[in-house]
Image (tube, rainbow, N blue to C red):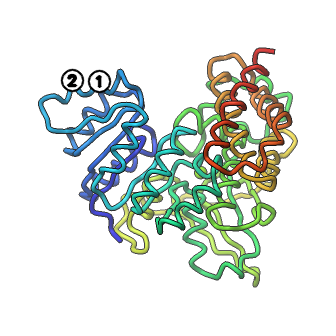
Amino acid sequence: MNSKTISVLGASGSVGLQALDVARKRGIKVSYITANTDVKQIEALAREFNVKAVAMACESSALDLRRSLADTDIRVHVGKEGILEGISEAKCDAFVNSISGMAGLLPSLEVIKTKKRLCLANKESLVIAGELVMKSASDNGCEIIPVDSEHSAIFQSLKSGRQSEISRIILTASGGPSFGKTKDELERVSVSDTLSHPTWSMGKKITVDSATLMNKGFELIEAAHLFGVSPDKIEVVVHPESILHSAVEYIDNTVIGELSLPDMRACVQYALDYPERSIATIERLDLFKIGSLSFKEPDFDSFPLLSLAKRAAILGTGMGAVLNAADEVAVEAFLKGRLSFNGISEVVTGTFEKMTDAKGASSLSELLEIDTLARKISNSLIEE
Ligand code: MG
């Protein structure tokens, strides 16, 4: 459709900045941007793209930004409610939701109400409330196009066959910086080891999630909702080079996958332009330079969060909300040095086992309650 004007939610994060880079290189207009607290960066971006409106989740940051932009006619929305207000008012063809974590859920639901295209990088929207988000999108006739690289690859690979012809989804994982380590070795893994991802450059939370394979677990839940496939049909394959971004196997055993350099700008661009393609903003794939691609089985014992996510996907939406909340709390504690690497999976698993009653939940109010309770339980497990 070649989006002419876009809005970017979570504009100061890694994917948000790459989405804006696509806009910059392609001359796409940006009408609305949001962020959490980064006043200086948002001010600079607002001026560069001459946006109509901005919003900041943090209220005092929003008020600072309003003062900094006083010489312009850019509207500044305040707080989480303000972000939603800005979405309903924004004049654009598509929204990129690259907010990190639970905070992205209500914005996704608000975008869906506008019936404009939702280019979704916030996987938590689907992890926490997959059924609700997908149903609301279909009721509103809103297209959700994935920006997560694996899901973009699957989405593209699905153009080669029918839904009834899918036999398996191959979800690739780089394995992260801790791939190949035993459980004992993982106990001594530090924050800085974990934050140095070999192939992708991303925000801190998702980099830790890549190392624990929680991110891959979330992506499994995300794929099950987005593509309407049973979690049993999704197989995770470790592929350290991050060149094959995922693939679909059809009933004739033909596998169709998408290969490109690991660069989120390709995924953003595809989501904005689908069903068309446009000239690349990323470099060409040089197969001679890459030489070989390798594939390995994930180690389910050292990385228990992957199987836990599959269980959550089978049990139902509420369990995704538990996983996400517990993981947000545990990763924050790990980054602050209050929890070891293995402690993350212990806290998430402990919270999960205490909350299996959550499995039937599907309404927004139930899911929000589950989120609050799961955070409380995780915090108490960390303090033990
Ligand atoms: Mg991904």
Which residue: 37% across, 64% down? 280
Residue 237's image quarter?
bottom right
- Secondary structure at badge 2 equals helix
Identify which residue, 377 or 124, lies in the foreground: 377
Where residue 78 sits: x, y (%)? 34, 31
- Secondary structure at badge 1 equals helix
Which residue is the site of mark 1? 63
Q: Are marks 1 and 2 in contact (CB under 8 Å)?
A: yes
88 in relation to 271, above or below: above
Which residue: 68% across, 57% down? 172
225 in relation to 122, above or below: below
Residue at the far bottom: name it.
252
Is 274 positioned to the left or the right of 23 in the image? right
Is 33 positioned to the left or the right of 299 in the image? left
Q: Is mark 1 within 8 Å of ligand 1?
A: no
Where residue 366 sits: x, y (%)? 67, 43
Which residue is the site of mark 2? 67
Which quadrant is home to the C terminus? top right
Is 357 positioned to the left or the right of 54 in the image? right
The numbered disc on residue 232 is none
Q: Amino acid at mark 1?
A: Leu
Where residue 2 sits: x, y (%)? 33, 68
Where residue 341 sits: x, y (%)? 74, 27
Which residue: 54% across, 58% down? 289
Is 284 positioned to the left or the right of 131 in the image? left
